[in-house]
């Protein structure tokens, strides 16, 4: 039935309506493989992994539109945020064709999954997709090797193979309370020293009713991510440039950790900090118990949601402050979409990726479904700016942010070693110096 | 010659059921034996979730490394031991007390029985999430309650000296009802005439309970001890949802340690070794229980 001329015409009309089919119709694709007739793809079913919370609801309406326009059915395979990497790794390691489109959370995924991903450059060339529309750091995260993965010394940014296109972004920004800052006559902090002073002023000025800053101190990935902001802004790092050597013996790493730990130990963060995970911190902030919060940009909408938050409407944003004359370097995480090399529906999978990462769909998902966009021009859209005033800050943060490191063993390094050492320093089981010394030793062992 | 047919009939009687057991044995073999053997096989190999095509035989390296090289193993075993012993002890004591109370037929005791069993019907994850909110040191109900009577509550889940206690509280809260259920059932089997006779002889409630009822509960006690010990020993969800092993690994029970080794370090060989060490320990505990508690149950006097 899809062979009938009218069905084909309908499908072609639908596709050209979203402006992605011009090259396919003319049949002069630059790659060696000819572009498939889009109507041949109609009726195929592809499977894509997503994180159940946030990610999935942001994608679903656009995916429904995709199916309507192309006839390609999409099944979403949803996982919890703390499970998706091991589940994806299991699929990848067993070379399964079960999933067609993998959601990839940046360099940690690329490090161990790049062999199982289809290089996308031929598809990009064939369909004339413009890669320059993406925020450069986001595009770089979908490459292997990249600025953020293990590589030969002298790697030039933007030359790694494109294995994923960016669909969803999450730089850390400083969320802070307009009303509290006005009450104390404060402006957004420009330096980390200033942030600590303001945290002190607010905590003491409110007698501990409102703490200066909320941190996610529980033994999990989140304490590590918040610590990265500080560590990097202090000019230190966990690894050297090629990600083959641990560098936490740098005195600046100890200073950064002391700074981080002292925010809590000096009493400027809530007492429950050592057990606070993402949800606990957000609950606290929605209640109004803290004035600053260095976290993902997408959290902004949650804090300002009048249905969930007592402090809705009071949250504005600033970049993560810098240190010692340097601008802040925040962590940026973000999801790319890649095609499974073993998939039996590669062309359909690519069509979905092309659709979801296109400027037009990125804009509609941002405005209608709260997805944090990866296409730079969306941040200049008037409607989006009006809806999300923090957008400008987020774009600025994303441009200058740094991604998590991509090397085998990063999960163990971040979630077993660093999460433990930082949490132990926070609760006072170890000094920051000892924690860094132990982390250095243990990470060196993993890298061997 | 004459007794030949009888013997074969006897043999048939003894083994005639065998074919009927075959499906069950097959299911057991597939569902139990296969994964067990497979994990034993895995535990003698170096194999990573990153690359499932490479299996390097390493003999008992995973075991020696676990017992003598891995700094997290012995602390984790200690935490598991405390967690198991304390929670099972509390569950048995509380379970017995509650069962004895519920066994007294008064108005409302049927309703009370239902209420006591409620925790068993809830999903462990849900229970843990509720308790996590209760335990929150800043906005939690528990510390608010304590503050109204002038006590400054600790950071339950954020303090290395309190987190294990908090985790045990939740484990006990959830699983005491199992002990109650078994003890209540066993209490129905205690013969009334013996107790009545004791009362006639002048024994009060306390003495008849201690000397008659509790000895009768010994088989139930064995069941509760074995089942609860084994379940507490391999508990996972409760602690995972409450603390994920923190703060500073103070609640890192073995099952979490195993999960971390398998899915954070992706070291499937070592994770399987942890699994087998846990299995052998559980086996040892069961044998000790069975030996210690067998055949001491009072028999009713022969009539």
Image (spheres, rainbow, N blue to C red):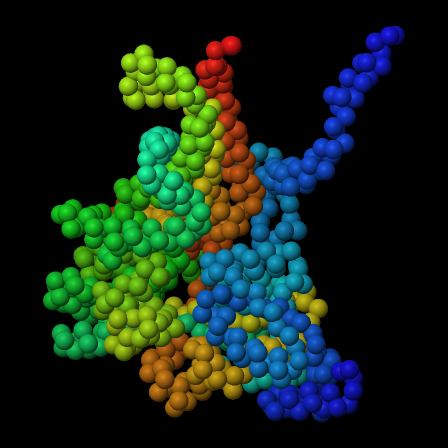
Q: In this view, does A388 lie to the left or right of A68?
A: left
In the rendered structure, the answer to whether residue A266 lies left or right of residue A73 reads left
Please determine whether, in this image, residue A332 is positioned above or below residue B124. below
Q: Which residue lies furthest to the top in this view?
A: B1
Q: What residue appears at the point 26 percent right and 55 percent down from the top-left corner?
A: B140
* Percent coordinates x, y for residue A412 in the rendering: 46, 52
Residue B284, percent across and down? 50, 26
Quadrant occupied by the N terminus of chain A: bottom right
Along the line of sight, the residue nearer the viewer: B148 or A250: B148
Residue at x-position 45% and y-position 41% = B235
In-front residue for pair B274/A307? A307
Is residue B45 placed above or below B298 in the rendered structure?
Answer: below
Q: Position of residue A214 (x, y in %)?
A: 27, 63
At horizontal 18% and vertical 57% (from top left) the residue drawn is: A266
> Quick check: A21 above or below B249?
below
The x and y percentages for residue A439 are 37, 50
Count of number-bearing discs: 0
Of A434 and A167, the residue lying toward us = A167
The answer to whether any part of residue A231 appears in the image is no
Identified at 43% across, 51% down, the residue is: B125
The residue sitting at the right extreme is: B1
Viewer-side residue, A6 vs A272? A6
> Within the image, what quadrant is residue B13 found in?
top right
Residue B16 seen from this side: yes
């Amino acid at each position: 039935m899809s062979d009938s001329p009218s069905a084909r015409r309908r499908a072609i009309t639908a596709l050209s309506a979203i402006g992605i089919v011009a090259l396919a119709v003319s049949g002069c694709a630059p790659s060696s493989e000819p572009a498939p007739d889009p109507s041949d793809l109609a009726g195929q079913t592809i499977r894509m992994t997503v994180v159940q919370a946030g990610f999935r609801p942001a994608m679903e309406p656009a995916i429904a539109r995709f199916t309507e326009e192309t006839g390609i059915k999409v099944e979403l395979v949803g996982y919890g945020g703390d499970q998706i990497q091991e589940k994806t790794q299991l699929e990848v390691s067993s070379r399964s064709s079960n999933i067609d489109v993998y959601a990839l959370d940046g360099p940690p995924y690329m490090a161990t999954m790049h062999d199982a991903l289809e290089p996308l450059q031929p598809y990009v060339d064939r369909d004339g997709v413009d890669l320059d529309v993406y925020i450069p750091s986001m595009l770089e995260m979908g490459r292997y090797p990249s600025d953020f993965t293990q590589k030969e010394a002298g790697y030039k940014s933007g030359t790694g193979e494109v294995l994923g296109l960016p669909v969803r972004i999450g730089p850390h920004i400083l969320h802070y309370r307009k009303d509290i800052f006005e009450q104390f006559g404060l402006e957004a902090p420009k330096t980390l020293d200033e942030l600590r002073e303001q945290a002190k002023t607010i905590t003491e000025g409110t007698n501990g009713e409102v703490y200066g800053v909320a941190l996610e101190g529980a033994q999990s990935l989140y304490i590590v991510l918040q610590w990265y902001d500080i560590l990097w802004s202090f000019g230190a790092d966990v690894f050297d440039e090629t990600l083959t050597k641990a560098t936490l013996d740098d005195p600046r790493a100890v200073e950064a950790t002391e700074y981080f730990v002292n925010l809590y130990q000096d009493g400027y963060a809530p007492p429950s900090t050592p057990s606070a995970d993402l949800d606990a911190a957000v609950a606290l902030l929605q209640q109004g118990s803290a004035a600053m919060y260095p976290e993902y940009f997408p959290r902004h909408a949650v804090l300002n949601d009048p249905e969930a938050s007592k402090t809705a409407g009071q949250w504005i944003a600033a970049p993560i402050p810098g240190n010692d004359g340097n601008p802040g370097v925040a962590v940026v995480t973000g999801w790319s979409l890649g095609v499974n090399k073993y998939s039996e529906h590669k062309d359909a999978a690519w069509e979905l990726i092309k659709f979801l990462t296109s400027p037009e769909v990125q804009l509609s998902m941002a405005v209608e479904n709260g997805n944090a966009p990866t296409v730079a021009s969306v941040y200049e859209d008037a409607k989006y700016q009006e809806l999300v005033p923090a957008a400008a800050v987020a774009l600025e943060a994303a441009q200058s942010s740094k991604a998590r490191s991509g090397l085998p063993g990063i999960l163990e390094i971040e979630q077993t070693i660093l999460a433990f050492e930082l949490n132990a320093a926070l609760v006072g089981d170890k000094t920051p110096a000892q924690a860094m010394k132990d982390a250095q030793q243990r990470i060196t062992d993993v890298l061997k | 010659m004459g007794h030949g047919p009888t013997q074969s009939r006897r043999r048939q009687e003894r083994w005639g059921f065998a074919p009927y057991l075959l499906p069950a044995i097959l299911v057991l073999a597939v569902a139990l034996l296969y994964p067990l053997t497979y994990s034993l096989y895995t535990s003698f190999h170096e194999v990573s979730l990153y690359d499932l095509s490479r299996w390097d035989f390493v003999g008992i390296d995973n075991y020696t490394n676990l017992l003598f090289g891995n700094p997290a193993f012995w602390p984790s075993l200690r935490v598991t031991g405390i967690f198991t012993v304390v929670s099972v002890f509390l569950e048995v004591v509380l379970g017995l007390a509650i069962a004895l109370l519920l066994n007294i037929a008064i108005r409302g005791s049927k309703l009370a029985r239902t209420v006591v069993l409620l925790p068993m019907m809830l999903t462990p994850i849900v229970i843990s999430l509720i308790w996590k909110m209760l335990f929150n040191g800043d906005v939690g109900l528990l510390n608010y309650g304590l503050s109204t009577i002038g006590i400054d509550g600790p950071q339950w889940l954020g303090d290395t000296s309190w987190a294990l206690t908090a985790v045990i509280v939740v484990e006990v809260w959830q699983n005491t009802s199992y002990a109650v259920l078994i003890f209540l059932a066993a209490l129905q089997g205690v013969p009334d005439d013996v107790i009545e006779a004791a009362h006639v002889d002048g024994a009060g409630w306390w003495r008849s309970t201690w000397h008659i009822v509790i000895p009768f509960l010994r088989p139930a006690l064995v069941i509760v001890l074995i089942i609860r010990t084994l379940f507490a020993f391999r508990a996972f969800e409760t602690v995972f949802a409450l603390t994920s092993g923190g703060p500073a690994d103070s609640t890192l029970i073995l099952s979490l340690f195993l999960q971390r080794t398998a899915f954070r370090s992706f070291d499937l060989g070592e994770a399987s070794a942890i699994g087998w060490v846990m299995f052998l320990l559980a086996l040892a505990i069961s044998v000790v229980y069975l030996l210690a508690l067998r055949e001491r149950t009072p028999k009713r006097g022969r009539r």
